[in-house]
């Protein structure tokens, strides 16, 4: 009798020990081991078009500084720096998150199949993967 398993998560390694049983053997314990891969995350780099846009936007931040050489230059410079500080603070606050998300467990139904000639028997096992 051959034992197989299906329905495990993608990338999981399923091991059944022993994989075969002989007819007429006494009751035998069978171990099903499912090893799931570790979760990973990656940060995608900016595409070349996006990089150019970011550089262009950063360059425009310095345009108000070109007129700061005259009499009213110090006042204009201070106003520009205040505007930049307020805008930067607003962006930092807007990008923050105060409620972390909790990953939910995911359930899988693993089907173990025993086949001997034309006879087939199945049994299901519930697998819960905690993230």
Image (spheres, grey):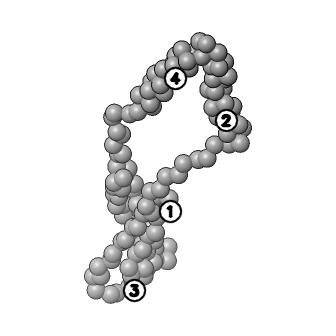
Of pointers 4 and 1, the one earlier in the residue sequence: 1
Q: How crowded is mark 1: few (under 14 residues within 10 Å), some or many (20 or more)?
A: few
Cα distance, mark 2 to mark 4?
19 Å
Of pointers 1 and 3, the one earlier in the residue sequence: 1
Label 1 with label 2: CB-CB less than 8 Å: no
Secondary structure type for disc 3: loop
Judge from the rendering whether residue 99 lies leftward or rightward of residue 73; answer left or right.
left
Indicate whether 115 appears above or below 109: below
Which residue lies at the image location 49% right of the left edge and 77% below the top edge?
117
Q: Where is residue 42 in the image (x, y as percent from the top left)?
A: 53, 51
- According to the picture, the residue beneath numbered tag 1 turns out to be 11
Q: Residues within 10 Å of mark 2 (few under 14, many from 20)?
A: few
Q: Where is residue 82 in the image (x, y as percent from the top left)?
A: 48, 20
Quadrant where the N terminus sits is bottom left
Cα distance, mark 4 to mark 1?
52 Å
Secondary structure type for disc 2: helix
Label 3 with label 2: CB-CB less than 8 Å: no
Of pointers 4 and 3, the one earlier in the residue sequence: 3
Secondary structure type for disc 4: helix
Q: In which quarter of the image is residue 2?
A: bottom left
Disc ID at residue 126: none
Q: In which quarter of the image is residue 38?
A: bottom left
Of pointers 3 and 2, the one earlier in the residue sequence: 3
- According to the picture, the residue beneath numbered tag 3 turns out to be 22
Q: Where is residue 3 in the image (x, y as percent from the top left)?
A: 43, 74
Judge from the rendering whether residue 106 lies leftward or rightward of residue 81; answer left or right.
left
């Amino acid at each position: 009798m051959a034992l197989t398993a299906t329905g495990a998560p993608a990338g999981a390694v399923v091991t059944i020990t022993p994989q075969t049983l002989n007819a007429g053997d006494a009751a035998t314990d069978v171990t099903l081991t499912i090893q799931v891969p570790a979760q990973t995350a990656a940060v995608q780099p900016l595409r070349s078009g996006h990089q150019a846009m970011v550089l262009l936007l950063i360059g425009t931040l310095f345009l108000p500084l070109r007129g700061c050489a005259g009499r009213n230059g110090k006042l204009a410079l201070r106003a520009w720096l205040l505007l930049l500080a307020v805008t930067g603070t607003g962006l930092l606050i807007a990008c923050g998150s105060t409620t972390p998300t909790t990953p939910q467990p995911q359930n899988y139904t693993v089907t173990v199949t025993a086949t001997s000639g034309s006879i087939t028997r199945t049994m299901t096992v519930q697998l819960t993967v905690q993230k």
